[in-house]
Image (tube, helix red, strand yellow):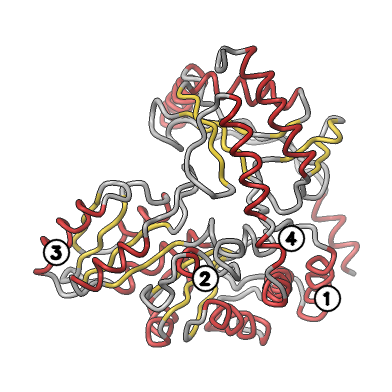
Amino acid sequence: MWRGAAVRAVRPTGGSRAASGAAAAQLRRWLEGELEGIRGAGTWKSERVIASRQGPHLRLEGGGAGILNFCANNYLGLSSHPQVIRAAVQALEEFGAGLSSVRFICGTQSIHKDLEEKIARFHQREDAILYASCFDANAGIFEALLTPEDAVLSDELNHASIIDGIRLCKANKYRYKHMDMHDLEAKLQDAQKHRLRLVATDGAFSMDGDIAPLREICQLAQKYDALVFIDECHATGFLGPNGRGTDELLGVMDKVTIVNSTLGKALGGAAGGYTTGPKPLIDLLRQRSRPYLFSNSLPPAVVGCASKALDLLMESNAIAQSMAAKTQRFRSKMTAAGFTISGKEHPICPVMLGDARLAAVMAEDMLSRGIYVIGFSYPVVPKGKARIRVQISAVHSDEDIDRCVEAFIEVGRKHGALP
């Protein structure tokens, strides 16, 4: 029965249909103009098609094999870890492909509750709540928590998901200069007239590879009776002695109230996000957070991946601890060659180039040498600050890193980025 239905479902029904009429034609002309403008500015983002598993070595569609991958968020190399894959298959077979429901109707399985408990235990918090992504977690928290009587103070370089989440809430909004504690203090002083004050920051900033000064932020929060929220997407799993993130790294786990993070980077790389913090907050999010209330539950296979990744991480910190030496190797060799590398001691290593076209052509030339990296330009980063973002993984070998550096030197000299 299922086979016949599937065959009927995929039979072609004719060519594509385009909307007609003056309005549709006007829209198409405008869209084509916008797209041409993006191409003309040198900021067009192409999607390379991978024909293998995620990992340090890739095969690209069209025959590109043996490609070294230096631009994934696969920090711990768990995306293709055999135990993680087996856990996904087991969850798929036992719990099915999906729930076809949101959590509060008929979409909560035992594995969802087990993973939430495990996340809370890992972060040493009271409770946790799962989302389809950390973008959803960030979209869902500020509106549910903050009222027009409150204030939120946000770093100017926070991730787009934090910015968008803050836009959705009705709190009074303050933006402080990037990691500038004098400016944050001035904003906190002005925000004393509000009921609650929430300082929101990335723990590690994904475009620049720098780490928020959480000690100083928490000191100011304590001085001005504020709460602290951190987004740990580029920290969870590998920063801190046990990979718990920037609050562990900087010794302020007991001073950060709310942690949002992802299951889609270091923790298996599949999908999903979460909020962890005080139990009453998590209970409130289950009642009010719109992305949670109106999105399907995480698929069992994704839950299985993340749960096993957390098991591996809590059993041993060896993988997380291997990151530091590999990161230092790349940063020191690139700096010695004459490149400017943004950030400090983070596996995100942005090679700063400035010009968008230069970043794009250098990234293409790197691929021709077997190194997969991507150029970043406006609007992902500010104008004039284009870069190639390199990301180090625990599964990169020293030979992989040295080969990447050698390719950068060749390409940099070819295009005038190095003397």
- Seen at 37% across and 75% down, the residue is 257
* Amino acid of disc 4: Leu
User: What residue is disc 4 on?
Assistant: 78
- In the rendered view, does 369 fall on the left or right side of 278? right
- Near mark 3 (Cα within 10 A), the count class, few <14, some 14-19 or many ≥20, is many
Which sits in the foreground, 78 or 15? 78
Tell me the residue that label 3 is attached to.
191
Query: Where residue 390 sits: x, y (%)?
Result: 61, 39
Look at 63% across and 14% down and name the residue there: 413
Residue 410 location in percent, x, y?
69, 18
Rendered location of residue 349, percent (x, y): 56, 41
Residue type pointed to by label 3? Ala
Give the foreground label among 1 and 4. 4
Secondary structure of residue under mark 1: helix
Quarter residue 189 falls in? bottom left
Question: What is the C-alpha distance between the residues marked 1 and 3?
Answer: 51 Å
Q: Which residue lies under the disc numbered 2? A: 274
Q: Report the residue at 54% width, 56% height from top.
A: 234
Q: Earlier in the sequence, mark 2 or mark 1?
A: 1
Give me the C-alpha separation between circle 1 and circle 4. 17 Å
Q: Earlier in the sequence, mark 1 or mark 3?
A: 1
